[in-house]
Image: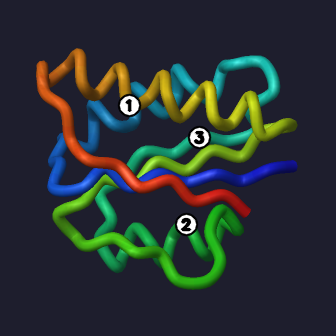
Amino acid sequence: MITATRVVANTYRDSVGLMQVSAALAATTGVQQASLVMATQANLDLLREAGLINGPVTAGQSDLLIVVRATTQSVADSVIERAVATLTEQRGDRKSTRLNSS
């Protein structure tokens, strides 16, 4: 399994909307888990406990974090791009993003 993350800097979305996007992405063939959360310490701790991230994450509490565990890198990358596009459509804006893979 491949785990990929992307930080969307200085972007806030409410947790209900993030859960809805996460659920839709998780239903994608080849995706084991997808999570979109604000990068608060509590959320980072939960992602570590779930085994979705390990090591440092360069994100602050005002950043949004996208984490995808998938069967292949191409599936993970595609799902992350869909998440960013969905967030952009919802807000009608573009934010800078940083991509990490492990």
Contact flag, marks 1 and 2 (Cβ < 8 Å) = no
Does dot 2 land on a helix, a strand or a loop?
helix
Disc on the earlier residue, 1 or 2: 2
Disc on the earlier residue, 2 or 3: 3
For the point 36% across and 22% down, which residue is it?
85
Q: Nearer the viewer, mark 3 or mark 1?
A: 1
> What is the spatial separation of the Cα atoms under label 2 and label 3, in whole angstroms?
11 Å
50 to 6, vertically: above or below: below
Q: Quadrant of residue 55?
A: bottom right
Residue 84's disc number: 1
Residue type at mark 3: give it.
Ala
Q: Which residue is mark 2?
A: 47
47 to 66, vertically: above or below: below
Q: Which residue is mark 3?
A: 34
For the point 78% across and 18% down, which residue is it?
29
Residue type at mark 1: give it.
Val
Residue type at mark 2: give it.
Leu
Q: Quadrant of residue 58?
A: bottom left
Residue 18's disc number: none
For the point 30% across and 53% down, which residue is it?
64
Q: Nearer the viewer, mark 1 or mark 2?
A: 1
Q: Position of residue 51 (x, y in %)?
A: 70, 68
10 to 29, vertically: above or below: below
> What is the spatial separation of the Cα atoms under label 1 and label 2, in whole angstroms?
19 Å
Q: Position of residue 76 (x, y in %)?
A: 68, 36
Residue at far bottom of view: 55
Disc on the earlier residue, 3 or 1: 3
- Indicate the quadrant containing the C terminus: top left, top right, bottom left or bottom right: bottom right
Does dot 3 land on a helix, a strand or a loop?
strand
Front-most of 34 and 63? 63
